[in-house]
């Protein structure tokens, strides 16, 4: 369900609702932000960072900036 997606909101809210599998954090409570920070610390302690999830918009801007197009 979370593979290849930014599930920050779902982790913060401790749920698996499809609409919360997003990087959108607006409206989260301080407690939910704290939960997300705890998840981040757990992941950082257990797994090395090997890649990052980026949006297609970010990729387009990176390639456009370099002079090539998608």
Image (cartoon, helix red, strand yellow):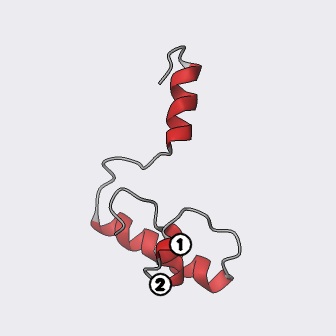
x, y percent for residue 67:
54, 13
Tell me residue 35's x, y (percent). 52, 81
Numbered-mark total: 2
The answer to whether residue 20 shows anywhere in this view is yes
Label 1 neighbourhood size at 10 Å, few (<14), some (14-19), many (20+)? few
- Image quarter of residue 3: bottom left
Residue position marked by numbered label 2 in the rendering: 14
Q: Residue at x 47, y 79 (%)?
A: 17
Which mark is in front, 1 or 2? Answer: 1
Asked if the residue at tag 2 contacts the one at tag 1, i.e. Cβ–Cβ closer than 8 Å, the answer is no
Helix, strand, or loop for circle 2? loop
| Quadrant of res 43 | bottom left
Find residue 53 and name its label: none
Q: Is residue 53 left or right of residue 49?
A: right
Q: Residue furthest right?
A: 27
x 46%, y 73%: residue: 18
The answer to whether 31 appears left or right of 12 in the picture is right
Quick check: 2 above or below 13? above
Name the one closer to the observer, 39 or 57: 57
Identify the residue position indicated by label 1 in the image. Answer: 19
Measuring 55% from the left and 62% from the top, which residue is drawn there? 23
Residue 40, given in percent of the width and then of the height, sits at 45, 69
User: Can residue 37 be seen by looking at this rendering?
Assistant: no
Q: Position of residue 14 (x, y in %)?
A: 47, 84
Q: Please, what secondary structure does the residue beneath circle 1 have?
A: helix
Packing grade of label 2 (10 A; few <14, some 14-19, many >=20) is few
Q: CA distance from mark 1 to mark 2?
A: 13 Å
Question: What residue appears at the point 29 percent right and 56 percent down from the top-left corner?
Answer: 48
Of the two numbered discs 1 and 2 on the same chain, state the one appearing first in sequence.
2
């Amino acid at each position: 369900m979370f593979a290849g997606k930014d599930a920050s909101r779902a982790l913060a809210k401790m749920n698996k609702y499809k609409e919360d599998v997003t990087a959108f954090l607006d409206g989260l409570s301080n407690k939910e932000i704290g939960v997300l920070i705890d998840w981040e610390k757990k992941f950082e302690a257990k797994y090395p960072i090997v890649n990052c999830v980026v949006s297609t918009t970010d990729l387009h801007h990176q390639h456009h900036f370099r002079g090539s197009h998608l």
